[in-house]
Image (cartoon, helix red, strand yellow):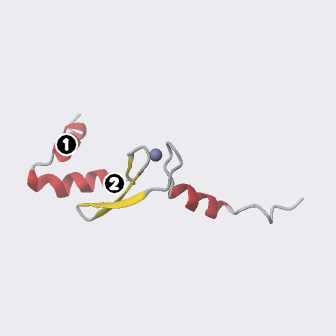
Amino acid sequence: MSDESSPDIKTIKHLAKMRCPKCGEILDQIDVYDIPIEKCPSCRGIWLDAGELELIAERGNTSGNWLSKLFKKLNSQ
Ligand SMILES: [Zn+2]
């Protein structure tokens, strides 16, 4: 038996990365404070990589963004 016809794991991971974990739709990339995040056009889910939420909160801090307040609150607990 050979695995040669199977897509390799890197390809699978790359394809999965571009799709919504919830509904499988191909994600749109949008910029929030110049940080690229993924948004699902189907279920409207927002997907962040590690550290991106923190960066958005920091950059939104100057305008008193609710997200930064939320993140600080979470960090203080
Ligand atoms: Zn979705």
Say what amino acid the circle numbered 1 marks: Lys
- Specify the label residue 36 is tagged with: none
Image location of residue 32, percent across then percent down: 26, 59
* Nearest to the observer: residue 17 or residue 74: 17
Left or right, residue 5 beside residue 30? right
Q: For the point 44% across and 47% down, which residue is it? A: 42
Q: CA distance from mark 1 to mark 2?
A: 14 Å
User: Which image quarter holds the C terminus?
Assistant: top left
Location of residue 11 with respect to 42 vertically, above or below: below
* Nearest to the observer: residue 52 or residue 28: 28
Among the two numbered marks 1 and 2 on one chain, the one whose residue lies closer to the N terminus: 2
Say what amino acid the circle numbered 2 marks: Gly
Q: Which residue is mark 2?
A: 51
Which of the 4 quarters of the picture holds residue 51? bottom left
Image location of residue 48, percent across then percent down: 37, 52
* SS for callout 2: loop
Q: Looking at this view, name the residue that lies furthest to the top.
A: 77
Q: For the point 79% across and 64% down, which residue is it? A: 5
Which of the 4 quarters of the picture holds residue 60? bottom left
Q: For the point 66% across and 60% down, which residue is it? A: 9
Image location of residue 46, percent across then percent down: 37, 48
Label 2 CB less than 8 angstroms from ligand 1 = no
Q: Looking at this view, name the residue that lies furthest to the left.
A: 63
* Nearest to the observer: residue 61 or residue 43: 43
User: Which image quarter holds the N terminus?
Assistant: bottom right
Q: Which residue is mark 1?
A: 72
Q: For the point 48% across and 49% down, which residue is it? A: 20
